[in-house]
Amino acid sequence: MLDYDKIASSVDSLRIFDYINVLEVTTSTNDYLKELDSGNYKAIVFAKEQTKARGRRGRTWISDFGGCLMFSFKLTPKLSLSNISFLTQLCAVSLHKTMLELIGDNVDLKIKWPNDLMLNSKKICGVLCESEIATDVEPSVIIGIGLNVFGEIDDERISDIASTIESELSIKIDVAKFMYSFIEDFFNRLTTLENTGKINQADIDYINQNFYNKGKFITGTAFTGKLLEVDSEGALLLEKEDGSVHRHMFGDVFA
Ligand code: BTN
């Protein structure tokens, strides 16, 4: 079982969020935060169960095997609209670095563009970044994360492509420690991004060094091509069969 009291108090000790809640059940933690009138303050919510958990591109997020850490946080970053998409890259770097610190770097952990984590070529973490842009208020962003921590995934819809940290490595990670380090690291990177207005090239290099399926020819539902790298704007560069290079700014390319 995930010890949510311990996880929430670990996050609380960082004094970053003005609102922290652990829900027994909700439709989706992203939707819960959308409904929450949190003004400009920072909020984070965990759920023990989600009945309508969503993934990117309208997909369902399957998490009923019981070992998935599910949470969302909402922030109002001091970023221009064009820089908000960099949060996706920051999240990928933070999640990957924090995880390696916890499980050691002698593992096959990769970032699948834009920000999934793949362990032994199986997805263990998915991120759903959603922005709320209205004319009368500052744009806010909700980042929802599902991390498959323990248990076995035997749902045949995903058992070939997804797994848990425990299944792959036979270890149980300290989730409270993970959350503390991830949130601390992410908000440090966010402060730098807010101050400079640009993502660090070192972060882009980091993504490229840990890029899942780099150099491989991928056949997706929307696009087909060879995955080259992420450019300095965080866009995916993809080489098509005719040799031309295409640039994708958003993550919803591959099934
Ligand atoms: C993806 O891989 O497509 C993204 C999955 C994101 C799942 C998380 S679980 C917590 C939050 N609530 C949701 O409904 N989705 C995200």
Image (tube, grey):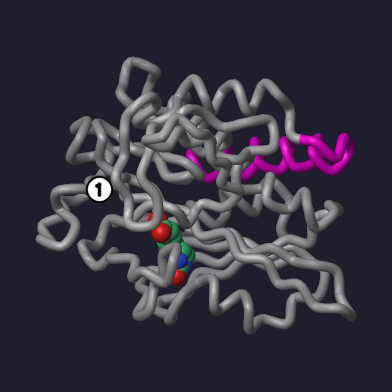
The N terminus sits in image quarter? bottom left
Number of residue marks: 1
Q: Mark 1 belongs to which amino acid?
A: Phe
Q: Is residue 122 above or below residue 228?
A: below
Which range is magenta? 177-198
Counting from the top left corner in percent of width and height, residue 57 is at 44, 66
Q: At x 41% / y 39%, what residue is drawn?
A: 112
- Left or right of 163? Residue 206 is right
Q: At x 56% / y 67%, what residue is drawn?
A: 45
Q: Callout 1: 10 Å neighbours few (<14), some, many (20+)?
A: many
Look at mark 1 in the image and give the residue it sits on: 150
Quarter of the image where ligand 1 sits: bottom left
Q: Is residue 38 above or below residue 94?
A: below
Which residue is at the front of the view, 94 or 82? 82
- Left or right of 9? Residue 52 is left
- Left or right of 38? Residue 244 is left
The C terminus sits in image quarter? bottom left
Counting from the top left corner in percent of width and height, residue 226 is at 38, 32
- Left or right of 4? Residue 182 is right
Q: Magenta-highlighted stretch: main secondary structure?
A: helix
Counting from the top left corner in percent of width and height, residue 200 is at 73, 27
